[in-house]
């Protein structure tokens, strides 16, 4: 994530948690607070998500999704995205879809359709992978 969009400092996170509004989804929760500066994003992944390697992987994935969505987010807010416990096992496309729907539920997306188009290929790939695995399972069931 580019430095100008990065949220840093314990005091900033604490302030957003205290004063901000919350909205939750299946894999992520968002806390946001109005600011007079440009929008900034911070990602948090607690010990519930997994060990440090898993937590850092989830944070990298969420940061990548957030960077792609920067143009679609409402300006004038600081965002803290919290990874929930199931996010470690979620495919990238499901994580992106959940984050987009959570932002939309909170009214923080300018254009939901445009945001979904960013990830449409990865969402189609994951749906295709699910279908392919279902087909393999059905084939294995019939040819035993």
Image (tube, grey):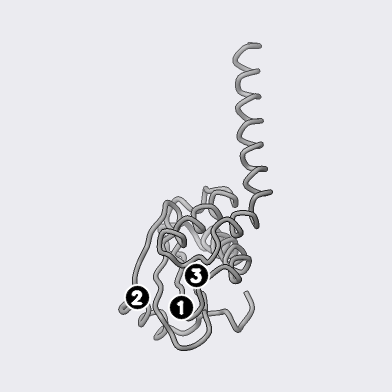
**C-beta proximity under 8 Å, tags 2 and 1:** yes
Q: Quadrant of residue 57?
A: bottom right
Task: Decide which of tag 3 and tag 2 comes sooner along the chain.
Answer: 2
Residue position marked by numbered label 1 in the rendering: 78
Instruction: Indicate the position of residue 44 as horizontal and vertical percent values.
Output: 46, 69
Vertical arrangement, residue 23 with respect to residue 144, above or below? below
Task: Decide which of tag 2 and tag 1 comes sooner along the chain.
Answer: 2
User: What residue is at 42 percent from the left and 66 percent from the top?
Assistant: 30
- Quadrant of the frame with the N terminus: bottom right
**Distance from label 2 to label 1 (Cα)?**
9 Å
Q: Nearer the viewer, residue 15 or 77?
A: 77
Q: Nearer the viewer, residue 77 or 52?
A: 77
Residue position marked by numbered label 3 in the rendering: 43
- Quadrant of the frame with the C terminus: top right
Furthest-bottom residue in view? 36
Where residue 17 is drawn, which disc sits there? none
Q: Residues within 10 Å of mark 2 (few under 14, many from 20)?
A: some
**C-beta proximity under 8 Å, tags 3 and 2:** no
In the displayed structure, does residue 144 sit left or right of residue 82? right
Say what secondary structure mark 2 lies in: loop
Task: Decide which of tag 1 and tag 3 comes sooner along the chain.
Answer: 3
Residue position marked by numbered label 2 in the rendering: 20
Say what secondary structure mark 1 lies in: strand
Q: Nearer the viewer, residue 102 or 84?
A: 102
Q: Residues within 10 Å of mark 3 (few under 14, many from 20)?
A: many
User: What residue is at 46 percent from the left and 85 percent from the top?
Assistant: 9
Vertical arrangement, residue 37 with respect to residue 42, above or below? below
User: What residue is at 61 percent from the left and 59 percent from the top?
Assistant: 114
Q: Quadrant of residue 71?
A: bottom right
Say what secondary structure mark 3 lies in: strand
Vertical arrangement, residue 118 with respect to residue 68, above or below? above
Instruction: Indicate the position of residue 32 as horizontal and vertical percent values.
Output: 41, 73
């Amino acid at each position: 994530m580019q430095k100008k969009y990065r949220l840093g400092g314990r005091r900033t996170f604490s302030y957003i948690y205290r004063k901000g509004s919350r909205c939750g989804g299946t894999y992520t929760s968002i806390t946001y607070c109005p600011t007079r500066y440009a929008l900034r994003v911070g990602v948090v992944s607690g010990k519930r998500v997994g060990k440090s390697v898993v937590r850092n992987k989830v944070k990298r994935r969420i940061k990548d999704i957030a960077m792609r969505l920067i143009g679609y987010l409402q300006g004038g807010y600081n965002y803290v995205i919290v990874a929930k416990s199931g996010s470690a096992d979620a495919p990238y496309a499901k994580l992106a879809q959940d984050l987009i729907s959570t932002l939309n539920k909170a009214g923080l997306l300018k254009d939901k359709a445009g945001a979904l188009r960013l990830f449409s290929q990865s969402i189609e790939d994951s749906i295709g992978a699910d279908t392919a695995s279902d087909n393999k399972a059905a084939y294995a069931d019939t040819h035993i």
